[in-house]
Amino acid sequence: MKKFSDLGIKPVDDRKIFNCNQVSITDVVNCEIEVLGYISNVKTQHGDGRCLAHYKYNGVEGKFFSNSTSIKNALDQIDEQNFPFSTIIRCAKCGSGKIYQFT
């Protein structure tokens, strides 16, 4: 019997996949993380247009979703060759909401 892996079938979906644990962005606020990459315009149960950031903290990889305009705009401005980079995510209160941003 043939194995599926021997059939030479390529996946149709060539999206990036970050095979690591998902956390809340609040789990890495005020921590120095290494941003390894990201995917923009992700649709989630909370809405469209989110980004999925792939990071490393204390040697462990993780990922978090964000709808922060500041974080999404910053990531979109970074050239691919500038990944990975180090940053700290800060959270500031703004009225009844919160603003997350790289520092």
Image: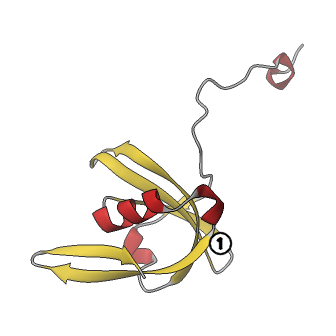
Which residue is nearer to you in this view: 18 or 92? Answer: 92
Location of residue 66 with respect to 28 vertically, above or below: above
Answer with left or right where residue 21 lies relative to residue 43.
Answer: right
Mark yes or no: residue 21 visible. yes
Residue 25 at what x, y percent from top left? 40, 70
Residue 26 at what x, y percent from top left? 37, 75
Residue 24 at what x, y percent from top left? 40, 67
Task: Name the residue furthest right.
Answer: 1
What's the residue type where badge 1 is placed?
Val
Location of residue 69 with respect to 1 vertically, above or below: below
The residue located at (80%, 21%) in the rendering is 4
Quadrant including the N terminus: top right
Quadrant including the C terminus: bottom left
Task: Name the residue furthest left.
Answer: 95
Residue 3 at what x, y percent from top left? 85, 21
Mark 1 neighbour class, 10 Å CA radius: few under 14, some 14 to 19, many 20 or more = few
Answer with left or right where residue 96 lies relative to residue 64.
Answer: left
Colouring: secondary structure
The residue located at (10%, 75%) in the rendering is 96
Q: Tell me the SS state at disc 1.
A: strand
The residue located at (49%, 84%) in the rendering is 31
Location of residue 67 with respect to 32 vertically, above or below: above
Mark yes or no: residue 64 visible. no
Task: Name the residue furthest top.
Answer: 1
Which residue is nearer to you in this view: 79 or 58? Answer: 79
Q: Total marks drawn?
A: 1
The residue located at (60%, 56%) in the rendering is 80
Disc 1 target residue: 60
Give residue 30's quadrant in the image: bottom left
Location of residue 48 with respect to 33 vertically, above or below: above
